[in-house]
Image (cartoon, helix red, strand yellow):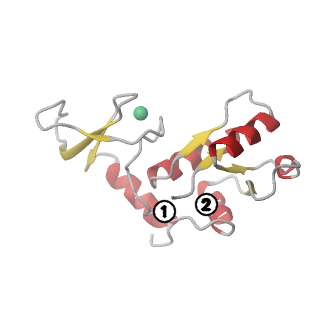
Amino acid sequence: MPQRFLCDRMLLRLARWLRAAGYDTTAADAHARDRDILADALSEGRLLITRDRALARHRYADGAVVVISGDRLAEQSASLGQQVAIDWQHNPLSRCLICNVVLNLAEPGAVRPMAARPPIRTCPTCRRLYWAGGHETRIRRTLASLSGEG
Ligand SMILES: [Zn+2]
């Protein structure tokens, strides 16, 4: 079972890239209290990734919270990587970057934007389309650079 994550509100960008790498990654609700965020992480079996040191001092935080530093994505991913084994090539572009749900393969002949080449994947929740050659190329490049290959 691959690692699952919950990111705090300061780490929405990092959350998006963890999804791009294929990790099941949710984000904390905007107004959730610390203890509720931690409770969600524990009940869903997610590792809580946060910038908030106070959260890590919570009595149930042991082994459930990773505090990372840095404002830029590269700094945050490096900080995370020092504490958790992250494979940025885990399962690229298998999830919607926005909704975190697993993408479906679009049926041949279904919605097909101009210039899109199959395979085209769709998000069952927001209906966004993902296809090779779209922004997928840029996403794969960023994932490669996060892996230290860029
Ligand atoms: Zn979506």
Considering depth in this image, is 138 or 131 the residue closer to the camera? 131
Q: Is residue 8 visible?
A: no
Q: Quick one: label 2, few (<14), some, or many (20+) residues within 10 Å?
A: many
Quadrant for residue 30, please give it: top right
Q: Is residue 115 above or below residue 149?
A: above
Where's residue 140, x and y in %?
A: 38, 58
Q: Name the residue that disc number 1 marks.
A: 88
In the displayed structure, does residue 102 sit left or right of residue 68? left
Up the image or down, 31 lies above or below 79; here it is: above
Give the Cα separation between the discs numbered 2 and 1: 10 Å
Q: Amino acid at mark 1?
A: Trp
**Judging from the image, what secondary structure is the residue with disc 2 in?**
helix
Check if mark 2's residue and mark 1's residue have beta carbons within 8 Å.
yes
Residue 25, position in %: x, y?
A: 55, 46
Measuring from the top left, give residue 62's x and y in whole percent.
81, 57
Disc 1 secondary structure class? loop
Quarter of the image for residue 101 reads: top left
Determine whether 100 is above or below 127 in the image: below
Q: Quadrant of the C terminus?
A: bottom left
Q: Is residue 56 left or right of residue 137?
A: right
Q: Give the residue pinned by disc 2.
A: 77
